[in-house]
Structures are given as structure tokens and as C-alpha cells.
Amino acid sequence: MKRIRVAIIGQGRSGRDIHGKYLIADKKQYKIVAVVDPLEDRRKRAIEEYGCDAYESYTELYGRDDIDLVVNATLSHMHPPVTIDLLNNGFNVLCEKPMAAKVSEVDAMIEAAEKSGKLLAIFQQSRFAPYYRQVKKVVDSGVLGRIVQVSVAFNGFARRWDWQCVQDFYGGNLLNTGPHPLDQALRFLDYDGMPEVFCIMDRANTFGDAEDYVKLVMRAPDRPVIDLEISSCCAYPSFTYNVQGTNGGLNGSMEHIDWKYFKPEEAPKQKLIIEPLEHADGTPAYAREELKWYEESWDVPKEDSSLFNTISRGFYNMLYKSLTEGAPLEITLEQVRQQIAVIEECHRQNPLSKLDITK
């Protein structure tokens, strides 16, 4: 089996604790041959942990012909320019999320990939999350009937003061956390065009200048309403997914999901009655019926209890087939482009003042 030789740019929480942690454990498909980080202590640690080469600048990778894939885990605002530079210099690139902050940046990245003939993939690994796949399975089965609304909530209570809460670094809840639930939400919308977007943003607990509260509603013709919330001021998060359908509904977290539904063919036959409803004794009645409910539940399998490992494995297995067999990417660039278009529109609707981070 061919091993993909990987260089990782960045040894922070993403480059080391997600990509590095997974890739060093994968002895069959991948091998880390180089890392890049401006901090000397991180380079030294990478040499010890991976047994690889280490560089201060990613341009020092240029000229090497033994690198099959470069993981771009730089700061978010560096994703577009570094990715384009890598593609122009002949490297396949896996870019961390967010891909970009503007559609124009996405288009420039796609153009660079097309001109170079190299593969460009975006690390939207939550598409492989067991809870998301289970919700999708239930919805696609049709037991809930026509889906009226899908609510997704990635909520919690947190106060943040690092670079990822600063606008100039492409920070904020929508660009940091948002790509995960938004990618999933857009799959339920299942609409190729630009959906209608309504968004409210707020700065609640952050010490930076980017938003940490997002309420995003999307809709499109003949599609369910999508209600997405990403809040850092929710002390009582109650669900990850709540689905409303004409035959039932679903509610659940990343670990446990419940859903219930009735079968229309078993339901009482009803017709519209305009006259006041009455009981047999002539007293007023409410339009109430007894439905036979079917209830089911799901718990995350023990082998998938480590969410980060499961979704990384799913993504990297998919990517391996693309690199070695030419298989199509499951998360397409066009899908990510739509995601960034929605994010850009949300920011257009909610212009936020900026801090002077040079002080």
C-alpha cells in the first residue's frame, strides 16, 4: 500500500493536535515527512514526535519532490494566500477550515488548483460525524414525512481571548466553529443556488472584536427552513439537532438521538370541518386525535466515541482514495464555496467595528 508523504504547515492545536495526532497513528496510508512552524520549540518537538524534517518557512518546502500532500494549518486568514502559493508550486493541498472569508478568495483558490492540475481539498471532516450521518439517515428514510425545519445548535458558554476571536485573523464563531454545522446544514437544505439568508450576530462574552453569537436562518424554494445557532452565551445547551416533519420529529445530541413518527396510513381519517366541534353531549370540543407513535433511538457506537478520531479517519480515508485512485472528493469545492458565500452574506448583514490590534 502506497503511503502518502505529508508536510504539515503549522504545529498549533490544528496542525499538531488534529492532523499530526491522526497522521502519526496511521501507519498504513500516511507518513509525516516535514513540518513547518515559525516557533523553534514547536519545530524541535515535531522532530522528536514525528522523526521528520522541520522548517521555519513553508517556502523551504519548495524544491522537494518527495511530498505528496501539504496540510495548510496556518492561521485562518493565511489559508487563501498560502494555499494558492502551494498550488502554484506544484503541491496537492489540504486546507484547514475556514477555506476563506470571501467568495473571491475561494474562486482564486479554485482557479489556482485548476491551473496547476493539483488536488485541493478542504478539511470539513465533520461531514463524517456519526451523529450527523444518523440524522441524515433518519431524514432520508422518509419516516418523518416532509421536513419542515431543521434546527442545528452548536452552543455553549465560553469567554474567548485568543487570535480566533479577532476579525483580522478571520476569527469569530461563524468562521471558527461555523464551517462544521453550516456544512451539515447546507446538506439538509440540498440547494445548489444561493439560499435566502437572514442572520443576527452579537459580541457577548468575547474579548476580541469578532462575533461569538450567531443566529442564521436559511430557506430556499421547496426546502425546509434551516435554523442554525452558534452561541457562546448559552449556559443550557439542550440539543445539537432538532428536526420537525409532517409525520414526526427528531431531537438529539452528538451522543444520543431520539425520533418519533406516525404512519399516515394508520392515522384516523380526517376532513376539514368549519362548524364548531362538539362532544357527544353537545359541549365544545377541541380538534384532538390519538395517533399511534413509533419511537426509536440511537447511541453513538463505542468505536466512534472519540469524535475527533472518527471524523478525521473518515476524511483521511476519503482523501487517500482521491490521491491514490482519483476518486471524487465527498466534500466538493463547490459545496464549500456555497458555504463561504453564506458566511460572507452574514457578515455583510452584520458589519462589526474592529479593534486596533497593533496597540
Image (cartoon, rainbow, N blue to C red):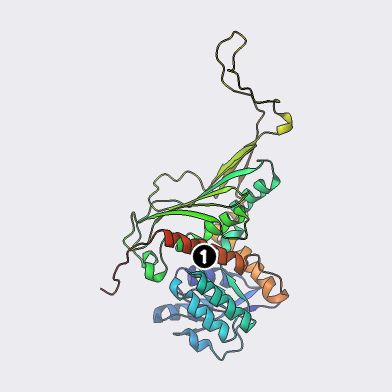
At 63% from the left edge and 24% from the top edge, which residue is drawn? Answer: 289
Q: Nearer the viewer, residue 2 or 263?
A: 263
At 69% from the left edge and 69% from the top edge, which residue is drawn? Answer: 328
Q: Is residue 215 above or below residue 91?
A: above
Residue at label 1? 340
Is residue 107 shown left or right of residue 212?
A: right
The C terminus lies in quadrant: bottom left
Q: Residue lying at the far bottom in this picture: please name it.
A: 63
Residue type pointed to by label 1:
Ile
* Label 1 SS: helix
Q: Nearer the viewer, residue 114 or 39?
A: 114
The N terminus lies in quadrant: bottom right
> To which quarter of the image does residue 160 belong?
bottom left
In percent of width and height, residue 23 lies at: 58, 72
At 34% from the left edge and 58% from the top edge, which residue is drawn? Answer: 206
Q: Nearer the viewer, residue 170 or 43?
A: 170
Q: Residue lying at the far front in this picture: please name it.
A: 274
Q: Is residue 80 above or below residue 282?
A: below
10 Å crowding of disc 1: few (<14), some (14-19), many (20+): many
At 43% from the left edge and 62% from the top edge, which residue is drawn? Answer: 348
In percent of width and height, residue 257 lies at: 58, 44
